[in-house]
Amino acid sequence: MGIAHRLIACTLALVTSLAAAAPAPTAAPAASPAPAAAPASSTPSGHTLDRADVESWLDGFMPYALERGDVAGSVVAVVKNGEVVLVKGYGFSDVEKRTPVDPQSTLFRPGSTSKLFTWTAVMQLVEAGKLNLDHDVNEYLDFKLPARDDGPITLRNIMTHTAGFEEQIKELIVEDPKRLVPLKTYVESATPARIFKAGSTPAYSNYATALAGYIIERTSGQSFDDYIEQHIFKPLAMPHASFRQPLPEALAPTMSKGYAQASLPSKPYEIVVPAPAGSLAASGADMAHFMIAHLEGEYGGARLLGPAALKEMHETPLTMIPPLNRMVLGFYEQNYNGHRVISHGGDTEYFHSYLHLFLDDHVGIFVSVNSLGREGAAGSIREALFEDFANRYFPAPPDTRRVDAATAAHDAAVFAGYYDDSRRPDTNFMSLVNLFGPMHVVPDKDGGITVSGFHGISTALTHYREVAPFVWVDPDSGWHLAAKVENGRVVRFSGDQLSPFMVFEPQPWWRAAAWQQPAGIAALVACVLTALLWPVAAITRRRLHVTLGLNDRDARVRLASRVAATAIALVSVGWLVVILAGLSHLSVLGPGLDPILFLLHALSVIVYIGGTAMLLWAAYATWSAPRPWMTRLWTTVLALSGFVLLWLACVYHLMAFSSKY
């Protein structure tokens, strides 16, 4: 699913938009423009991709990676030319019982990699003439998505994550099966706001995938689970795979436990409410069958899609920022070392996975781990596994191009600033996370750049150097970052690993973190200090038998400012606690939180508006009387603090009375 991690490291985290319409997707060359290849004589030669070499390499990589990252277990599957090269388990599916991972039967949660099954089902129905990728999806629904003047949403938009929806977090992953609602109920009640024109801006959406799953139900006349089992699992001989929640009794005993860290107790089975977006549980062996079916067009004589439909799914990219990777239909490009690669990653809170298909080489690799690990080690493990695999079997010389120093310094200066993530909550209180973690582009002293949130496998910030106008490369991994420039100004940017489904655009001044972060922190600190020191000062004066010597008017002014500052501090801290609690454990973000949200919204209206008015009055009254300069200064600071926090409350919808987020 990925959202919690994009919002926290977020990544979230998470988590902007292009106002102008992008051209409709059309067939295009399958691979993004790549750096000029080095002469063949200088191209490194790779290892032979066979069982012996792959197993030897994995046996040296995985055990240490799991131990170092405090990850309980993993499964890896590698296929080539229609055959399973290797499927192998590492570590434990149950740490307490010391149950080893069985690659044939142990179930892992691939998270959003599940979407590939949903997209495959959509393409089957397109091939059957029952769906059209370019028709308004309202044609296939028994309810209507809210209309916009700039056009409808199509299945092509949904499959390329350009439907235009804001991020939807509520009831994404829960622990209680009773909170799982029918797919129809979910898609009708949880429709997010559309914040972009359809087709214009990549913004990953779990809701949109759930909507596609409901369209599959409506069109096929079967439940989503029944359709997937009959048309994908059964033909591909995938007996250890299921979207059903809770798992069927026959499969439940083979399900791996999920862990925050292997050294901590296991966690409950995660229930993904928008099931078509991420509820799959499957073994490594079964995922190998699925990879072969996409690479070769069939598995064991069973065909998922005809050649034309398969080609359309794999080779219809939507270009947003050349030369970066692009979204195709359901898959997204992760081209590497000059090889065409389509992929999909996936995250629940505890399971973390990735599937890569090297199309021209007829090679696939799938990895899943059952723990987030220490300091989010799962992400580094799966990234390192892919990069090491590609460099071992499909090596290429590094991109050694450079621009001159003056150009590098100029472009870095133009690029510098704060940027919003297109994948973000935008119209509700959760939009406050956008203030916590915007992308910040900072020039290096040597003409390169760093971008907050863009970390290498070591978790250190990646240092990019410019290799072409407004195109940068990470010298360690070879991944590129690029910006789209109009009239000498960067209007959006992204990086190879994110560009198919997420872009970043300059923040407007009224919500720019450059001033909002320091101003908001200073304002909150001023109110919190006032709230904390108010009783401390009173107790101290009482013990020392000291009085303030204020007249009635000045005493009322002082009391009003303290009460207002304390109320604003308490409500602000309340919002922070709710958001941090929700991001640390997604099951918090559900209907049970609604009464607390209503209370906070109501208090916010009273406290931010009324409190700021009281602070402004106190400042005016203090300056209108012969008061000490320190008193005047502090009441002025509090008045400004109240205004800043009121501004933030308006910008980030803390007074909006909305339980949809």
Image (cartoon, helix red, strand yellow):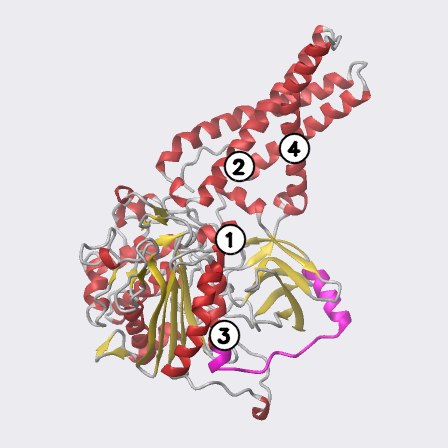
* Mark identifier at residue 525: 4
Point out residue 201 in the picture as x, y percentages from the top left corner. 49, 59
Amino acid type at circle 2 is: Leu
Residue that label 1 marks: 11
Asked if residue 551 is among those painted magenta in the image, a careful observer would answer no
Residue in front for this viewpoint, 603 or 376:
376
From which residue to which does the magenta span run?
Answer: 390-415
Residue that label 2 marks: 576
Q: Earlier in the sequence, mark 1 or mark 3?
A: 1
User: How much space separates mark 1 and mark 4, taking CA atoms?
Assistant: 26 Å
Which of the image's four quarters has the C terminus? top left
Amino acid type at circle 4 is: Val
Q: Is residue 600 left or right of residue 369?
A: right
Is 594 rendered above or below residue 472? above
Kindly state the secondary structure of the residue where label 1 is placed. loop
Is 337 rendered above or below residue 66? below
User: How much space separates mark 2 and mark 4, taking CA atoms?
Assistant: 13 Å
Point out residue 453 in the picture as x, y percentages from the top left corner. 57, 56
Amino acid type at circle 1 is: Thr
